[in-house]
């Protein structure tokens, strides 16, 4: 068929809009939106035909120009437009704090509280008892102080924001002394030297990459210029071998002697001791207990809450931050407060925190429990598709999120292989599942690590193999 002839057969917008099936869309989305969708579909159709080769034109099915066929395309277009760009996925990688997959999943109560607080009005900045304006800073401060022993606390947008406001409020125009071994890059555009520059403080780096002694800090202190001493936790890397660093205690002692505040960017926000699970990481209460003046950490790493940056420490410094112009720019929304408060409340009872905060539960899950789930998953996959072979194997899971880089947690996974379906094709089909599943390929097999797959997700993962070819 000739190109012109096909183009002539494209229905007019008005004709398409009159077609059956679109009335429901008018009712739901409104006539203007549907008209726009029809215009867009017809335009796409025209462009598609204009680009066609003579062979493609030869084979063109003219029924695609039927009004009903084009109307169906409009319906499909509207459905696709209605899909969100942010949606849930299943994490089968075994990496607990997967930054690409949203870091920490929230506990049930946090999720419920977000819905409860955000679906209507809330007392975000209103003192209900007094009947007058309140402050959002008070929502979680007391709870954080109770849990950490801090004098005061503040919640900002994330730990990067926290670093920014801490340095601006405490050391703008002054030098901040940091070890060369701790000039961390976290990823994205977060580098300690760059943040320092943005904040208006000047980096005074001391020592060498592998060795920084307490005397290096003392020698760098200039009563005229120095604003603070800072320690940064090397969250996502380790320096090993011939090394030396000054401890928090060393810095606190030096700070006292020279009347300088000591800041600790601890990063991960771990609130409990996880040494017995192989996690040799600092935790918030113990670090604060050394006498640090100000300490900051993320809300969505090992704390297991929503994205946020928590600043704790001496009242005189935190008060300065609350009044700083950046506080407004870095403030968090009611949804974050709602999730953070419920997450923090769990820590009043360590046992409860370990059980209910998803990431702590995942870190501490016993091996036999994971093995049972892996067996269940392997059997369910085999039952859904006889073209694949599913085998339970031991795996090494990671904490992720730039935390505890040397820690490998022994876990269990299901390795899936097939004579008929290539492994990359299986991996792709899982991603294209209604509920997308993100898995890794290991040793040419598809690997589903069960540590990050919830009991209630097992069947969904198995179902994704149904009809896979
Ligand atoms: C993760 C981390 C940050 C950045 O925290 P975000 O909450 O991702 O902004 C800063 N410093 C350290 C030491 C970290 O580990």
Image (spheres, rainbow, N blue to C red):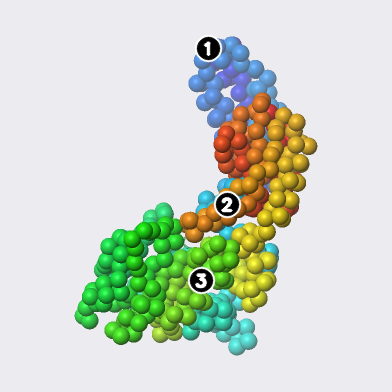
Q: Nearer the viewer, residue 167 or 204?
A: 204
Badge 3 marks a residue whose secondary structure is: loop
Residue contact at pointers 2 and 3, CB within 8 angstroms? no
How far is mark 2 from mark 3, CA to CA?
A: 21 Å
Find residue 45 and report its horizontal and vertical position in percent. Answer: 57, 26
Q: Residue furthest bottom?
A: 130
Disc 2 target residue: 397
Secondary structure beneath disc 1?
A: helix
Task: State yes or no: discs 1 and 3 in contact (Cβ < 8 Å).
Answer: no
> Does the residue tagged 2 have its C-beta within 8 Å of any atom of ligand 1?
no
In the rendered structure, which disc, 2 or 3, sits on the residue that comes first in sequence?
A: 3
Q: Crowding at label 2, few (<14), some or many (≥20) Cα neighbours within 10 Å?
A: many
The numbered mark at residue 54 is 1
**Which quadrant is home to the N terminus?**
top right
| C-alpha gap between disc 1 and disc 2 | 54 Å
**Ligand 1 under 8 Å from disc 3 Cβ:** no
Front residue of 368/330: it is 368
**Residue at 66% over, 37% down:** 416
Q: Can you give x and y, in whole percent of width and height, for residue 67 in the image? A: 68, 26
Q: CB at mark 1 closer than 8 A to ligand 1?
A: no
Where does ligand 1 appear, by image quarter? Answer: bottom left
Packing grade of label 1 (10 A; few <14, some 14-19, many >=20) is few
Residue that carries the numbered disc 3 in the rendered image: 283
Crowdedness near tag 3: few (<14), some (14–19) or many (≥20) residues, C-alpha within 10 Å? many
At x 51%, y 21%, the residue is 50
Tag count? 3
* Residue 171, image quadrant: bottom left
Mark before the other along the chain sequence, 1 or 3: 1
> Is residue 292 positioned above or below 381 on the image?
below
Specify whether 192 is left or right of 158. left
Lower sequence index among marks 1 and 2: 1
């Amino acid at each position: 068929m000739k190109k012109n002839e096909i183009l002539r057969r494209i229905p007019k917008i008005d004709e398409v809009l009159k077609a059956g099936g679109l009335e429901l869309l008018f009712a739901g989305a409104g006539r203007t939106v549907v008209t726009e969708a029809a215009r867009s579909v017809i335009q796409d159709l025209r462009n598609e035909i204009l680009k066609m080769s003579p062979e493609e034109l030869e084979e063109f099915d003219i029924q695609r120009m039927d009004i009903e066929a084009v109307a169906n395309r409009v319906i499909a277009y509207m459905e696709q437009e209605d899909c969100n760009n942010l949606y849930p996925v299943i994490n089968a990688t075994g990496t607990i704090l997967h930054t690409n997959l949203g870091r920490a999943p929230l506990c049930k109560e946090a999720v419920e509280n977000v819905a409860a607080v955000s679906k209507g009005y809330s007392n975000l900045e209103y003192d209900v008892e007094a009947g007058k304006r309140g402050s959002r800073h008070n929502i979680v401060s007391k709870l954080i102080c109770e849990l950490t022993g801090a004098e005061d606390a503040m919640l900002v947008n994330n730990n990067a924001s926290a670093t920014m406001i801490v340095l601006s409020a405490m050391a703008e125009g002054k030098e901040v002394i940091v070890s060369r071994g701790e000039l961390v890059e976290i990823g994205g555009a977060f580098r300690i030297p760059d943040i320092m520059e943005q904040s208006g403080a000047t980096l005074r780096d001391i020592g060498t990459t592998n060795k920084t002694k307490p005397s290096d800090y003392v020698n760098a202190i200039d009563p005229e210029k120095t604003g603070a001493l800072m320690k940064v936790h090397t969250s996502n890397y380790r320096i090993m071998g011939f090394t030396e660093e000054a401890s928090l205690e060393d810095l606190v002692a030096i700070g006292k002697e020279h009347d300088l505040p000591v800041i600790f960017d601890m990063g991960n926000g771990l609130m409990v001791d996880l040494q017995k699970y192989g996690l040799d990481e600092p935790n918030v209460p113990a670090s604060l207990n050394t006498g640090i003046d100000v300490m900051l950490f993320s809300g969505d790493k090992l704390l297991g809450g929503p994205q946020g940056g928590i600043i704790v420490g001496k009242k005189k410094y935190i008060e300065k931050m609350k009044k700083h112009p950046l506080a407004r720019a870095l403030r968090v929304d009611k949804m974050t407060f709602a999730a953070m408060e419920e997450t923090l409340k769990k820590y009043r009872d360590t046992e409860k925190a370990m059980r209910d905060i998803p990431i702590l539960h995942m870190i501490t899950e016993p091996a036999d429990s994971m093995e049972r789930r892996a067996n269940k998953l392997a059997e369910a996959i085999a039952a859904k598709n006889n073209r694949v072979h599913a085998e339970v194997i031991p795996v090494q899971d990671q904490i992720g999120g730039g935390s505890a880089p040397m820690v490998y947690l022994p876990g269990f996974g299901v390795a899936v292989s097939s004579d008929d379906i290539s492994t990359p094709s299986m991996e792709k089909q899982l991603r294209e599942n209604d509920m997308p599943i993100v898995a890794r390929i290991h040793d040419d097999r598809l690997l589903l690590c069960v540590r990050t797959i919830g009991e209630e997700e097992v069947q969904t993962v198995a179902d994704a193999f149904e009809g896979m070819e």
